[in-house]
Image (cartoon, rainbow, N blue to C red):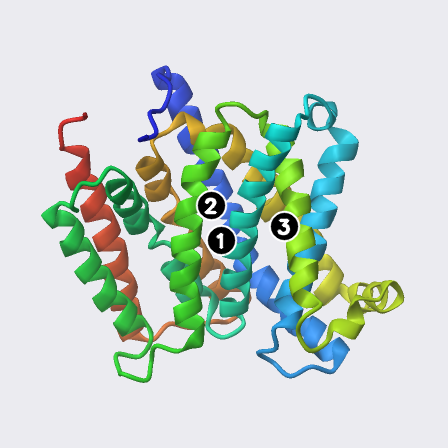
Amino acid sequence: MEYQPAPEPRGGEHRAVVALLVATVFWGCGFTWAKAAGEAVHRVAGLPDGSLFGPIFILAWRFFLGGMLIFVTIPAARTGWTCRGALRIAGVGVVLAAGLILQHVGLDRTSEAVSAFLTSLTVLFVPIILTVVLRKPPAPVMWVGVALATAGVWMMTGASPTGFGAGELLGLGCAFTFSLYILVVNAVAKTEDAWRMSAGQFLVVATACMATAALVPGRENLRPDAAVRVVSSGPVVWANLLALVAFPTVGAFTLLNFFQPRLDPTHSALIYLMEPVVAAVYAFIFAGRTMHPLMLVGALLILAANVLVELLKGREPKG
């Protein structure tokens, strides 16, 4: 059944848009923090760059701390739990965990800007998934958008057959998974409190990430004494971790759980396009990242594809 957002007063819709824009700013900055923290974990643990352990270890800690912070400080997160509700929230957490693991493992294999721009392809995947569920073929404009975005991805990765590597492939998988996440959040939010959703799914994500980290090289650092040593090894780890907990985790995802269900899924996906822009600007200013001119053209093509799809879909008569 297609998601139908509840009627929202115009002022309420504007507040939802502003709230989601703030969330995208937090997520965009979080790309640089997560990359720096993951690389620092590898240095402390004696692991080579590109290892799976660092980014997954940071994910596990940031969502565990975020979930516990909400449970301890927000009474609404501790009340109203039912078995059926817990299963729904756990399902949301599993989808979020899959998307985040794909994103952060990919982030360790490409730049912040490339990872963020590929994540923005959710704006294409969301309407495609809705169309498949409704058993209707994509409109011609959807194929135009896919073609433009594919060309953009090709340019961002070097405009050569070898430019599309593991990091970029993981980024695309992340975009598809986050598209599912947008839809399941809107569905579960109809029956579950936003604070319960935030706290519950955070702890599910932490558990999934910890289980994943236990399967890869470096897992000996999961022992309590070793984990504390890694986290407290220096400000590059713990300061970035605290920033990730406060802003992209508790701040951004709580805003998402409260305000995204007030908008149409494709409208939300369009707003999230600000995330790669923030990521690229923040990485350029604070991390010294650069973008080749051809990569910049590719990024603009991806944004053009996303905006074109949304503008033309907005002119279609609503069913």
Of residues 158 and 99, the one drawn nearer to the viewer in this rendering: 99
43 shown above or below 264: below
Which residue matches tag 2?
24
202 shown above or below 279: above
Q: Quadrant of the C terminus?
A: top left
Question: Looking at the picture, which amino acid does disc 3 mark?
Answer: Val
Q: Point out residue 290 in the picture as x, y percentages from the top left corner.
A: 42, 73
Which residue matches tag 3?
205
How far is mark 2 from mark 3, CA to CA? Answer: 20 Å
Question: Looking at the picture, which amino acid does disc 1 mark?
Answer: Gly
Q: Element at badge 1?
A: helix
Q: Element at badge 2?
A: helix
Residue pictured at 31% horizontal, 71% vertical: 156
Residue pictured at 44% horizontal, 50% vertical: 178
Q: Quadrant of the N terminus?
A: top left
Residue pictured at 55% horizontal, 42% vertical: 91
How far is mark 1 from mark 3, CA to CA? Answer: 20 Å
How far is mark 1 from mark 2, CA to CA? Answer: 6 Å
Question: Dot 1: few (<14), some (14–19), or many (≥20) neighbours within 10 Å?
Answer: many
Does residue 96 appear left or right of residue 265 in this picture? right
Question: Dot 3: few (<14), some (14–19), or many (≥20) neighbours within 10 Å?
Answer: many
Q: Point out residue 5 in the picture as x, y percentages from the top left corner.
A: 36, 24
Q: Earlier in the sequence, mark 1 or mark 3?
A: 1
State how many labels appear.
3
Q: Element at badge 3?
A: helix
Give residue 242's mark: none
Which residue matches tag 1?
28
82 shown above or below 231: above
The reply to whether residue 240 is visible in this rendering is no
